[in-house]
Amino acid sequence: MNTIQIGTSQHNFCDVSESWIHQQVGQRHDDGQNVCAMVTLENGSVNLLLSTPQCSRGGGGGRHPNQKEEEIIGLWEKLHLNEAHWAAGNLVAFVKQAQRLLC
């Protein structure tokens, strides 16, 4: 199953809207919280958990990513979602592009 979680709110990755992402991120920023966003992708040959630096989680899976996973990880990094000061618009861009690959 493909999911996106922002803070404690979770949504189906393939059905999530741009407005939901902006609302969740904005609400947490307004409350002065660090915003944690996690994307779980389990679809055919893809099995990934991506998270922004504000999330506390364990280590990686112990295997090298396959070509499709590398492409998705590269997109995450290209949009600076692996950096402390990421933007909601970049998360939206990631979701839109990854949805084309997975949904």
Image (spheres, helix red, strand yellow):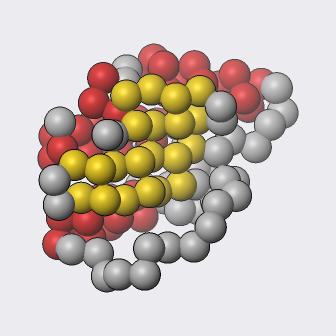
Residue 62 on image: x %, y %:
43, 81
Q: Nearer the viewer, residue 30 or 64?
A: 64
Residue 66 on image: x %, y %:
21, 74
User: Hey, which quadrant is residue 53 in on the image?
Assistant: bottom right
Residue 21 on image: x %, y %:
49, 27
Residue 73 on image: x %, y %:
35, 64
Q: Nearer the viewer, residue 96 or 12?
A: 12
- Residue at position x 23%, y 38% from top? 99
Q: Nearer the viewer, residue 63 or 24?
A: 63
Q: Quarter of the image for the C terminus: give it.
A: top left
When the figure is inspected, residue 42 is found, relative to residue 84, above or below; the finding is above
User: Hey, which quadrant is residue 75 in on the image?
Assistant: bottom left
Asked if one can make out residue 84 in the rendered structure from this viewpoint, the answer is no
- Residue at position x 37%, y 20% from top? 17
Label tally: 0
When the figure is inspected, residue 64 is found, relative to residue 35, above or below; the finding is below
Asked if one can make out residue 47 in the rendered structure from this viewpoint, the answer is yes
User: Hey, which quadrant is residue 34 in on the image?
Assistant: top right
- Residue at position x 64%, y 45% from top? 36
Horizontal side, residue 64 vs residue 34: left or right = left
- Pick out the residue farthest to the right: 32
- Residue at position x 24%, y 58% from top? 46
Q: Quarter of the image for the N terminus: give it.
A: top left
